[in-house]
Image: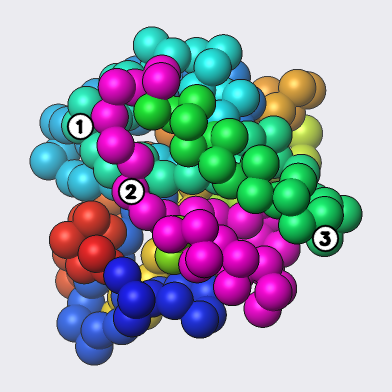
Amino acid sequence: MARLYGSEVRRIPTSSPLVALTFNAAWDETGVETALTVLRGRNVPATFFLTGRFAERHPGAARLMAAEHGIGNHSYSHPQFADLTRPEAEQEIMGADRAIRRATGAVPLPFFRFPYSATTPEGIAHANELGFADIEFTADTNGYLGTTGGMTVQKVVDRVVNALTPGAIMQMHVGTAQGHGSALDVQALPRIIDAIHAHGYRITDLRTVLE
């Protein structure tokens, strides 16, 4: 893990045509079972970054994710870390770790993703001190904006295709923020997987590549 410390990780260090899929879970559980069914049916791995609050509110969904995929830490309540004191930041990270462990009965990966991807050198160093590597992303599909935010399934797929590069880490979301409509990333997932494969890329598992 030490080799991942000291900076944010936004891509897998490789020249091979590999891509990793990740999902953030901070809102409701809409789309979780569908996403897992698609991933299972296509034999595709993913990593889910949960907030502690999500794990507490939706323990069944959290357990389903942890049973089949790697799970990471996305803070307890999804705050702006720049507004937090050092003790508050530690509580956000470690509180989420405890909540995820309680909800899932599993040991989360030592991976932390900052809310809003708002990283700072000081914040990354603090997460490292707590035993977590900072795993961010190469591109976000923006599916979380929903149709009310101008997104469509095709736009989600296009953002993935346009970001394809060896080692790319794609960020998606399960669940929906209030008023943002359906979970577009989950709707787009079969087409995303097909598009990645059609461009000659293989979907890999962060658990084996980055640990």
What separation in Å lies between label 3 and label 2 (alpha carbons)? Answer: 24 Å
Where is residue 99? Give x, y as percent: 50, 26
Q: Residues within 10 Å of mark 2 (few under 14, many from 20)?
A: some
Left or right of 18 in this view: 149 = right
Q: Is residue 48 rendered magenta in the image? A: no
Quadrant in the picture for the C terminus: bottom left
C-alpha span from label 3 to label 1? 33 Å
Mark 2 lies on residue: 109
Q: Nearer the viewer, mark 3 or mark 1?
A: 3
Quadrant of residue 179 in the image? top right
Q: Is residue 124 magenta?
A: yes
Q: Residue at x 44, y 76 (%)?
A: 5
> Where 154 falls versus 117 (above or below)?
above
Magenta span: 102-131
Label drawn at residue 82: 3
Dot 3, crowdedness within 10 Å: few (<14), some or many (≥20)?
few
